């Protein structure tokens, strides 16, 4: 770094700059710097904030909260504000993020035992302030989430404390709670699953049996998981509210809401659909307390079953959820199916239980070793050999000498630390030593050692017993709440209320349901309907029903249009102003909305002379048309009969059959009797 040039004392001018460090400065393009900074920030958000770890299923802030609660654990409730403050020494962000994360954990009712107003996932009500609510770890959390001896620790952000890298959770917590997170260029959404089913799935995974798990939501509801795809990207789960007929006529009861919504947002969607004319309701009442109860009052004469289908089609009574199972594994994101995640968690639980058993075995063997050593030391009165010793070295030597004949009875070598511990035995303990009790204590230790060794040899069976115990202990009350079924998507056009009237102003060429004052009523429609209209010049267009739409002056034909309509159109048209006359029958086929199609040859001056729609082919075949020609000197017969059954039904773009090259006056339909 260059120093400022020194100022001359005599002249006051600056001398030539002098540089102490002449090393070259690295110059990098600003684009590279921003690219590196972006990648660092994105990696930080993915690894440290938004995506859970594969083994404990927790985000860093959740892990720090649980670790902090374990530090404060004394069996009593703690103020949430106190827990948040204690967590601040581990978490590099503010108290608001900690408080929000803790409330979300508490509302899942699995790891945290709550007291006070923690909000309501059914209504969306917020929790009270952290200073008013209390919490402690649940018995389940104390059972499966903590084991300091097998936990890997790392320094906290400021280096003053140690925090767990991951908690040694012996359960697929990630799938039980579910998680959502949005990172930079990556999102995570793992849906919650049933506690009991997860225990059974882990047992099946350990036994190498096939299994399949599906989501289960605390709100209940009805679920179609046909396209779940194992929770991977591209999958989809459709969830519905449970709607029942009320005790009173024309009243619907919503007793369960879909996952991802609340009673408030659900009611808002119903009101919005009513205002848009998609459904018809009188009022909506919310009687939700411990259980959901939303009453939807219908007007007289409204069909309740159709309204239920309309609620699924136009409101939040039916939602589509897109899972995306992604976790942190080996310090990078990994996409994994929920079935594979169960297998990983089951195997990880087996490893943790194995580590705990090995530690327990080591501790039991250490207790057995010292208990046996103490028994020899006291029963063989080796402590008397040190009474005359005047130095520490002499004491140690005397004990070693006294123990030498009995060292083969021990399972491991005696160390200097063992000898030092023997010297710490108090005289009171020696005087009250009971050989029979010592033998019983050693026998109990040997029994425990044998049991632990047996569990280590049958570790898979021990892990299965662990999950079965969790199911038996914590499973009651955790039964499935969401009903699994399949249902078809409701076609909105079939259930929407046709409570609008389409008007036509033929003179000005406008149609729509907003022309009540200036048009003539045609038919009932809904905002989701399509209309088809034909112009006298031979153009046909399909458009969506809107308040006001230009359809051309004096349209030849206008009606509702259905995509699967198999109607047959009969048309006789003149090509150009003085061209030939053609006859054709056609079906509309595929169309693009608001695109004008030509059913003539497109010659300027073309005109539709006859138009008729028939719903069936038999009805179309039965018609006979009479074409009346304009009088001319060389014409003897001015009437041509056209049996329409002789014309093949083709596409709308077909040319048609030539009727005549002479000028046509009019086309009339023959009466049935005349045709016969």
Image (cartoon, helix red, strand yellow):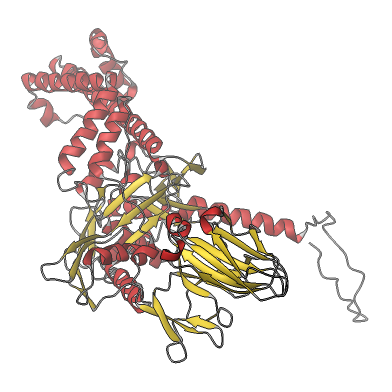
In which quadrant of the rendered image does the C terminus lie? bottom left
Q: Nearer the viewer, residue 431 or 469?
A: 469
Residue drawn 30% across and 43% down?
146
Q: Is residue 388 visible?
A: no
**In the image shown, does 378 or 309 lie closer to the viewer?**
309
Residue 207 at x, y percent in the picture: 30, 24
Instruction: Answer with left or right where residue 663 lies relative to residue 27.
Output: left
Q: Is residue 581 above or below residue 41?
A: below
Q: Position of residue 394 (x, y in %)?
A: 30, 20
Query: Does residue 22 lie above or below 450 as drawn?
Result: below
Residue that protrudes farthest toward the bottom in the picture: 517
316 or 329: nearer the viewer: 316
Q: How many marks?
A: 0
Q: Going 26% across and 76% down the picture, which residue do you hit?
A: 281
The N terminus: image quadrant: bottom right
For this view, does 113 lie left or right of residue 503? left
Residue 443 showing in the rendered view: yes
Residue 28: quadrant of the picture: bottom right
Percent position of residue 148, x then y: 32, 40
Q: Position of residue 157 (x, y in %)?
A: 48, 55
Residue 245 falls left or right of residue 661: left
Q: Quadrant of residue 401?
A: top left
């Amino acid at each position: 770094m260059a120093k400022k040039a020194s100022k001359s004392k005599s002249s006051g001018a600056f001398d030539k700059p002098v540089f102490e460090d002449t090393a070259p400065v690295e110059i990098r393009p600003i684009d590279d710097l921003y690219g590196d900074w972006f990648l660092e920030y994105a990696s930080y958000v993915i690894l440290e904030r938004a995506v859970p770890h594969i083994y404990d299923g927790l985000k860093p802030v959740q892990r720090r909260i649980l670790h902090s609660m374990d530090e404060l654990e004394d069996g009593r409730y703690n103020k949430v504000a106190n827990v948040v403050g204690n967590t601040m020494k581990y978490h590099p962000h503010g108290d608001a993020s900690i408080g929000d994360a803790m409330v979300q954990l508490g509302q899942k009712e699995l790891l945290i035992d709550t007291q006070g107003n923690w909000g309501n996932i059914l209504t969306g009500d917020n929790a009270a302030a952290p200073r008013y609510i209390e919490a402690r770890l649940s018995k389940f959390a104390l059972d499966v989430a903590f084991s300091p001896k097998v936990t890997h620790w790392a320094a906290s952000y400021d280096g003053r404390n140690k925090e767990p890298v991951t908690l040694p959770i012996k359960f697929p917590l990630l799938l039980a709670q579910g998680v959502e997170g949005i990172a930079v260029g990556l999102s995570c959404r793992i849906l919650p699953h049933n506690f009991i089913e997860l225990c059974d799935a882990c047992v099946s995974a350990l036994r190498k049996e096939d299994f399949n798990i599906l989501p289960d939501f605390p709100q209940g509801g009805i679920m179609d998981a046909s396209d779940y795809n194992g929770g991977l990207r591209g999958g989809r789960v459709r969830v519905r509210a449970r709607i029942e007929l009320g005790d009173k006529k024309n009243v619907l009861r919503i007793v369960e809401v879909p996952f991802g919504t609340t009673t408030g947002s659900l009611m808002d969607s119903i009101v919005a659909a009513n205002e848009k004319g998609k459904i018809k309701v009188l009022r909506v009442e919310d009687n939700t307390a411990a259980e959901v109860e939303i009453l939807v009052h219908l007007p007289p004469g409204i069909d309740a079953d159709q309204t239920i289908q309309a609620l699924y089609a136009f409101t939040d009574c039916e939602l589509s959820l897109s899972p995306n199972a992604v976790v942190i594994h080996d310090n990078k994101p990994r996409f994994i199916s929920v079935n594979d995640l169960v297998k990983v968690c089951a195997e990880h639980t087996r490893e943790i239980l194995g580590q705990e058993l090995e530690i327990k075995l080591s501790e039991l063997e250490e207790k057995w070793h010292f208990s046996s050593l103490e028994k020899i030391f006291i029963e063989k009165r080796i402590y008397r050999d040190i009474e005359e010793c005047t130095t520490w070295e002499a004491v140690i030597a005397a004990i070693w000498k006294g123990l030498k004949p009995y060292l083969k009875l021990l399972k491991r070598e005696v160390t200097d630390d063992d000898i030092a511990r023997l010297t710490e035995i108090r005289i009171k303990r020696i005087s009250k030593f009971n050989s029979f009790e010592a033998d019983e204590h050693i026998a109990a230790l040997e029994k425990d050692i044998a049991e632990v060794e047996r569990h280590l040899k049958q570790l898979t069976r021990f892990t299965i017993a662990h999950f079965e115990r969790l199911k038996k202990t914590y499973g009651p009350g955790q039964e499935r709440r969401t009903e699994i079924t399949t249902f078809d998507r409701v076609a909105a056009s079939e259930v929407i209320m046709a409570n609008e009237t389409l008007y036509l102003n033929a003179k000005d060429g406008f149609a729509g349901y907003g022309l009540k004052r200036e048009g003539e009523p045609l038919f009932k429609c809904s905002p989701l309907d399509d209309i088809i209209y034909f112009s006298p010049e031979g153009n046909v267009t399909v458009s969506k029903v809107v308040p006001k739409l230009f359809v051309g002056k004096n349209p030849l034909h206008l009606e509702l249009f259905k995509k699967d309509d198999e109607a047959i159109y009969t048309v006789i048209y003149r090509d150009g102003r003085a061209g030939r006359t053609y006859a054709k029958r056609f079906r509309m086929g595929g169309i693009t909305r608001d695109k004008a199609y030509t059913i003539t040859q497109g010659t300027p001056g073309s005109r539709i002379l006859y138009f008729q729609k028939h719903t069936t082919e038999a009805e179309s075949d039965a018609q006979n048309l009479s074409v009346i020609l304009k009088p001319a000197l060389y014409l003897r017969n001015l009437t041509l009969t056209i049996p329409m059954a002789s014309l093949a039904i083709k596409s709308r773009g077909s040319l048609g059959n030539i009727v005549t090259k002479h000028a046509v006056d009019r086309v009339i339909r023959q009466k049935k009797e005349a045709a016969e």
